[in-house]
Image (tube, rainbow, N blue to C red):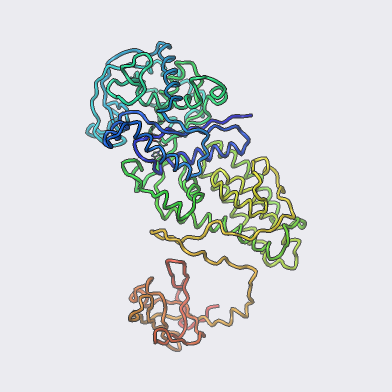
Amino acid sequence: MEKFYITTPIYYANAEPHIGHAYTTIACDVLARYNRLKGKEVFFLTGVDEHGENIQKVAEEKGISPQDYCDQILPTFISLWKKLNISHDFFIRTTSELHKKGVSKFLTRLYQSGDIYKGKYEGFYCRRCERFFTEKELADDNHCPIHKLPVDLVEEDNYFFALSKYEDRLIAHIEANPKFIQPETRRNEIMGVLKAGLKDISISRSSVEWGIPLPFDSSQNIYVWVEALCNYITALDYYQHGDLYHKFWPASVHMMAKEIIRFHVVIWPAMLMAVEHPLPERIFAHGWMTKDGEKISKTTGNVIDIDGLIDDFGLDPFRYFFMREFSFGSDGDYTQERFETRYNADLANDLGNLLNRTLGLLGKNFETLPVPTKVGEFDAEIEEMAIQLVDQVDRLMESIAFDTVLETIFEYIRRINRYIQQTEVWSLKDDLERMGTILYNAMEGLRIVSVLLLPFMPEISVRICQQLGLGDSSQDLDSINKWGGLPSGLPIHKPSPLFPRKDASPKNKIAKDPEPVDESNLITIDKVKETDLRVCQIIGAEAVKDADRLLKVRVDLGQEQRQVIAGIAQSYEPADLIGKQVVLVANLKPAKIRGLESQGMLLAAVSKKSLSLITLDKPISNGAKVQ
Ligand code: ME8
């Protein structure tokens, strides 16, 4: 069986996880789930980086031991991954025996390679990053380029790894393996670094107490970054060097954000070369989640309320949004508006609506899922697109382009919606064979979509599958490589909305579901004509006393003037209304509202939080009929 080994970085345990950590971990989860769907044997690793100065400092501030501190913060990671439905196979802690023994073994081998030597180190050290910078890399005024905090000039007797020796081999490896560093921009950046020349690196610290001792000199601890990189093999029980290690090493993908790629594509491979172990196949660095242009980090805090978003919108829409909205590999700026718009447009409108309207029409016209018998216009296109979609998604997944994968799937969903529209399927009551075929095709398209969406929205995918009548049957990619796998004769389920609509509002309040358009409850033109709609111009408007929603509006209808009491005060200032041409229901029986006569009603589009009067595209005489 083909294997797939994917890793997240191990996150520092010096603070609780935030959206940036969630972003990488969801991305890895998507890849792990997709590769399982493909039938591969997957090992998905995540974990925490628990040693080093930062952890020691936080523990000291709290007045507890570093180990107690790590034990206390651990559940925040575990419970977030549970909440996000992360399907990791193993969670590594760098304070575990498994890791410590594995690291010692690796460092012993490295020592035996002859590439370790003792020396004096002087450099600019950022305590937050736990790394050194060259003078050139520093931001203005000797500040860390990432944290913008002052760096320290540090001098220590350390052990060094002869990194510079590996410069040419690394360049050759990168050139021979185009997939080794992705995306392209990072590859170019790293080539630049390599060609400028590498310096040897210090791999131990005499001043940091909280760490793993060097196996060949216990007076020094292993530099936390060297130790952390080893997690990718210690988690496979490198110490025993048994089946697990042999089955899964080298990793298929190391995933991370761009700020730590150098450790992964320079130091880690060079150390692996030194001990003659295979190199990871692919190292992918995505962009940063930003808020108002600033990288979201422990310093900025939890500027995105993960719990709040999931409570309001559901977990799968949360996962969907972050994979869909930002081009994977580039930075992405988060706003709540972007979230709500994406939710309403893609999920509620395109996908949710398609399932609702298809099931609604099936329920009204059929006992069970019909057999497709009567082929007609557009059917072939729907079928061909589905087959191409499966291939396209596979190619795009292979290049880790999540946003494009989802865009491609949703393009197909929108095509099926158009198919329903173009065929006017709701009007085919007298041709049930044709109606049945179209609805079958829509359901089959949805089945294919449900499998492709599974890595992104695992729960929604199962719910679609259940509503299609497939129960809890397990899904895989083989089941969708040909059209027509959905068995006719399945029971028809009542639609149950997957994505309750939310109103775009900064406070993100939950709005009630709007009624879906009921295509089976059609009216004739006569009924429309019963309503006398007229253009009128607003010539006066004032607030109604003690009624904060109402305005008293005076309108000119050409032959007459009228007074209308309209519930529009929360959307319009009286002065802004004067002169607007709007639409009046002119034959509405007059009514008393708050003691004031209302002679008609103004038409407006209403969603939960906002209201917009129907106005005219170009001026026309007052009193003109609207038809
Ligand atoms: O660097 N946008 O740990 P860390 C996107 N322990 N991703 C983000 C992000 C953001 N704003 N902020 C964090 C470490 N991340 C080391 C790693 S691995 C051997 C050792 C994600 O807690 C992203 O994956 O600082 C980034 O690379 C990682 O968290 C850094 O996590």
Image vertical order of residue 211 relative to residue 91, above or below: above
Residue 36 at x, y percent in the picture: 59, 37
Which residue is outermost to the right?
Answer: 373
Residue 467 at x, y percent in the picture: 63, 55
**Residue 168 visible in rendering:** no
Asked if residue 249 lies left or right of residue 56, the reply is right
Who is closer to the viewer here, 235 or 31? 235
Which residue is located at x 37 percent, y 31 percent? 50
Residue 490 at x, y percent in the picture: 72, 54
Total marks placed: 0
When asked about the image quadrant of residue 595, the answer is: bottom left
Can you say which quadrant of the picture contains the C terminus? bottom right
Which residue is located at x 39 percent, y 41 percent? 17
Who is closer to the viewer here, 237 or 282? 237
Which residue is located at x 75 percent, y 68 percent? 430
When asked about the image quadrant of residue 560, the answer is: bottom left
Can you say which quadrant of the picture contains the N terminus? top right
Residue 289 at x, y percent in the picture: 40, 43
When asked about the image quadrant of residue 80, the answer is: top left
Which residue is outermost to the left?
Answer: 141
